[in-house]
Each structure stands twice: as C-alpha cells, then as structure tokens.
Amino acid sequence: MDNTGVLIILSGFAGSGKGTIIRELLGRYDNYALSVSATTRSPREGEEEGVHYFFKTEDEFKQMIAKGELLEYANYVGNYYGTPREYVKQQLASGKDVILEIETEGALNIKREYPDAILVFVMPPSVEEIHNRLLRRGTETEEIIEKRMQKAGFEITVVDRYDYLMVNDVLEESVELFNSIVKCQHMAVSRNRDYIEDKKREFEEYLSAKKEK
Ligand code: 5GP
C-alpha cells in the first residue's frame, strides 16, 4: 500500500475547537505532523516564533511568494497567511500525515495541487459561540471581531466544497472521528493505484505460470 502521508486540511471558525482537536491528535498519535504557517499578523500574547507562526513583514512574505516557497496563501481580514511548501513535502514523503490549519480560500487552492488532500470543516455547536469565543479571548478589537464574523459568514458558503463536516460537540468523539477519516483515506483506491497495478501483474504471472504447466 502507498506509504506516503495524507494531507489533511482543517478549517473552522474561532470557537470551533479545531486547535484543541489538533493538540489532542498530536499528543495521542505519532503519525501526525503539524505545518507552521507564515503570517504578517502581529503575534498575540503567548504566541512564539516558529511554534504558532513564522511572523513575517509584508515584504518578507511577498518574497516568499515570489520565490515559490508557499504551497498556498491567502489574505484573511487584512493579513497574509501561507503554508511553507518544503516542510509539507518532506513530511508527506517521510510518511507523516500532515495537518494544515488554514482558512477556506487556501484550502480550496490546495485541493487543486493535491487532489487526494482531505478537507475537513469543524463547526462549533452554535453560531453565538463563535462570537462569544472571540470576545472571551480578548485579543481583538470589536471592529476586528466584526470583520471576522463577516468572514465566517462567507466561509460557511463554501463549506459544500469540503469533504467532511464535523460538529465539535464532544471533543473525544471529534478526535477519534478525525483519526478515522485519516486512516480511511490511506485506503482510498485513488492513493493506491501502483499497489493495484502490482497485484494485477502478480495475478497475470500466476495465471500464465499455471497455463504453462
Ligand atoms: P488567526 O489570526 O486567528 O491565527 O488565523 C486566522 C485564520 O487564518 C484562521 O482561519 C486560520 O486557520 C487561517 N490560517 C492560518 N494559517 C494559514 C495559512 O497558512 N494559510 C491560510 N490560507 N490560512 C491560514
């Protein structure tokens, strides 16, 4: 069977709990690698360079685009966000299942380059929870929160182009469901064409050897 990793894209609104799902997966299983994005957004309190994001100036970010160093990028509420290409390629080749936590525009662009990538959208149990979570976090101004809510209203309109939808009600269930989706994807026929061709050849050899006897 194919032993390269699966590329999994996880999108969802603030308050959906996608970050917690990812932390749990990384803590529980050793087959996952999380891609760290580059962004022009300023760090929030507690965010570390190279752990949460690679923090870039707009010029630095544009250079990364020009050099083809990003697998995808998008502008989200006034800041650029992008996925460094090399890390993803290396990890997939080494057999790791790579998680990208990115917004919808970038996610849909990735699907063009990696048709076998799986797109999962995580929803919080209610729309109010999105707003409440942004308020509770207290890291954004009222104006930015409003812009993020408008963006969320747009993002919900493209969710029908995703592969899976997950309502994150019970964390434990979401983590295990997510892990099952990835396991199933490893068995997708589209990922295992070479394996199938090998088996066809084996059968042909077996059957022609029988005939000769
Ligand atoms: P935040 O500012 O809250 O950390 O992230 C804002 C949005 O940008 C979230 O929806 C997050 O998933 C998304 N995002 C983070 N990194 C990337 C990236 O590399 N590419 C894209 N397209 N979106 C990203």
Image (tube, grey):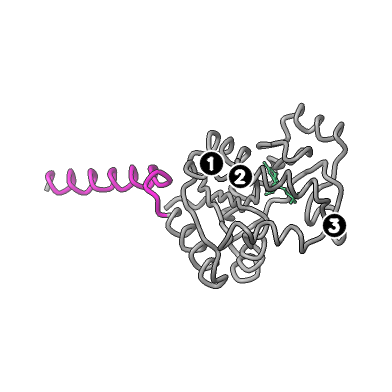
Q: CA distance from mark 2 to mark 1?
A: 7 Å
Front one among 109 and 147: 147
**Residue drawn at point x = 46 percent, y = 48 percent:** 163
Choose the circle earlier in sequence order: 3 or 1.
3
Q: Which residue is mark 3?
A: 48
Q: Is residue 103 magenta?
A: no
Q: Which residue is mark 2?
A: 153
Are the residues flagged by discs 3 and 2 in contact, CB closer than 8 Å? no
59 in relation to 152, above or below: above
Q: Dot 1: within a 10 Å radius of its alpha carbon, few (fewer than 14), some, or many (20 or more) residues? A: few
SS at mark 3?
Answer: loop
Q: Dot 2: within a 10 Å radius of its alpha carbon, few (fewer than 14), some, or many (20 or more) residues? A: few
Residue 208 image position (x, y, % from top left): 17, 43
Q: Which kind of residue does numbered mark 3 sit on?
A: Glu
SS at mark 2?
Answer: helix
Front one among 42 and 190: 42
Label 2 beta carbon within 8 A of ligand 1:
no
Give the main secondary structure, helix, strand or loop, of the magenta stretch.
helix
Q: Which kind of residue does numbered mark 1 sit on?
A: Thr
Q: Which kind of residue does numbered mark 2 sit on?
A: Gly
**Of marks 3 and 2, the one in the foreground:** 2
- Rendering quarter of residue 154: top right
Write down the region rendered in magenta: 187-212
Q: Dot 3: within a 10 Å radius of its alpha carbon, few (fewer than 14), some, or many (20 or more) residues? A: few
69 in relation to 146, above or below: above
SS at mark 1?
Answer: helix
- Rendering quarter of residue 134: bottom right
Q: Which mark is residue 157?
A: 1
Residue 138 image position (x, y, % from top left): 82, 60
Q: CA distance from mark 3 to mark 1?
A: 32 Å
Are the residues flagged by discs 2 and 1 in contact, CB closer than 8 Å? yes
